[in-house]
Amino acid sequence: MSATLVRNVKDTFIEKFKTEPLLIFSPGRINIIGEHTDYNDGFVFPAAVNKGIAAAIQKSDSDNSTAIALDLNSSIDFELDKLKPSKEGSWENYVFGVVAEIQNKNKIIGNFNIIFKGNIPGGAGMSSSAALENSVVFGLNEIFNLGLTKHEMILISQKAEHNYVGVKCGIMDQYASMFGIKENALHLDCRTIASKPYEIDFKEHQLMLINTNVKHSLSDSAYNDRRSACEAVSELLGIKALRDASEADLVTIKDKVTPANYQKALYVIQENERTLKAAKAIEENDLELLGSLIYQSHEGLSNQYHVSCDELDFLVDQAKQNKQVLGARMMGGGFGGCTINLVSKSEAKSFAKNASKAYKNKFKKDCSVYFIELSEGTHIVK
Ligand code: GLA
């Protein structure tokens, strides 16, 4: 958590609204493995991190509500009974969506003010959106005593994203951000929405992120397209979700789907298996195996699921050329954002330096390196 962020939203809130706010920190996440499996009812392996969104929130007696995105220097006043999605891509949809979905559950809230600020770079694939949604629902639940459980809150955040932001996301991001545990990753079953925590101590190795600083504008529609393709294949197979399919099942419908969709479904089935194997590898402290599963995950994301990009592929290739990097892959929805690297502690800095230099030479722009800590989920800051 960043104390500076929290102080910043608190001071601004008091200055502007002349009252003490409730303070919340809601983290972003990484994901060790299990990409694009969550909306297939499959397994994922995320962890909340020490980067996220700080929010200051309090009830208001004025006749409208105000939300302020401090990073963007942008403010919006709105009326609770007149909510509708703003134009595509605007930040207020995360706030409006959460409010609307709370109302859809017949929970009554009054006017409120919220100010937030974050340190997750946008488009990094670290779920700044889930962090924001969770901070809003968590804050409203507290100040209006809504009695929502954390499970109910993450479903509200997810629906906000579906209906107001327009991304038909799975549950991984909201779950990881809300339920994160310090020094742990969560092996999450996205069907039951229950997870098993794994203490992550890779001894001489560590996780490190490299951000391509690329965000492709078509990623939302491409994401929804992937989801539809998976659902279409499930329907053909007569199953609820690809989580229920084996590679052998998939062969039985090979001539009924396009080769592209066949590869996508195959990727999901294989990635789900890899995620289960990764949990076992971590239990057995087999980092070589974990690393190789991570590399395979990237292969699949790039060549079967087609959600990578040149910059991500380049950074993974850089990792492959360095024996001290056991695994690397793109992380999150794709088309830009970060790679996650499993690298020896002694080599991490020099790998980061060399990869950054090569990246700059190749793409004439900078990538960014993040050393992260696995941290607690959405919480109140005293
Ligand atoms: C985005 C979505 C998640 C998940 C990942 C890919 O982050 O919000 O639900 O599908 O992409 O694994």
Image: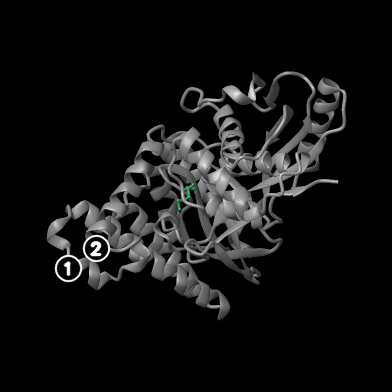
Where residue 198 appears, as percent x and y from the top left, is 62, 70
Q: Amino acid at mark 1?
A: Thr
Quarter of the figure with residue 8: top right
> Disc 2, ligand 1: is the CB inside 8 Å?
no
Left or right for 343, reference 73: left
- Assess disc 1: are there few (<14), some (14-19) or many (≥20) residues with their C-alpha within 10 Å of its C-alpha: few
Q: Would you say residue 120 is visible in this rendering?
A: no
Q: Residue at x 31, y 54 (%)?
A: 230
Left or right for 286, reference 10: left
Q: Is residue 322 above or below residue 132?
A: below
For the residues labelled 1 and 2, say whether their Cβ atoms are less than 8 Å apart.
yes
Q: Nearer the viewer, mark 1 or mark 2?
A: 2
Q: Which residue occupies the extreme bottom position in the image?
A: 284
Q: Which residue occupies the extreme front position in the image?
A: 106
Where residue 302 appears, as percent x and y from the top left, is 34, 52
* Nearer to the camera, 42 or 35: 42
Q: Label 1 belongs to which residue?
A: 252
Q: Would you say residue 54 is visible in this rendering?
A: yes
Element under disc 2: helix
* Nearer to the camera, 111 or 366: 111
Where residue 324 appears, as percent x and y from the top left, is 52, 65
Q: Who comes first in sequence, dot 1 or dot 2?
A: 2
Q: Which mark is residue 237?
A: 2
* Nearer to the camera, 374 or 142: 142
Q: Amino acid at mark 2?
A: Leu
Q: Which residue occupies the extreme left position in the image?
A: 255
- Assess disc 2: are there few (<14), some (14-19) or many (≥20) residues with their C-alpha within 10 Å of its C-alpha: some
Left or right for 173, reference 168: right
Gap in Å between the C-alphas at discs 1 and 2? Answer: 9 Å
Q: Residue at x 66, y 48 (%)?
A: 27
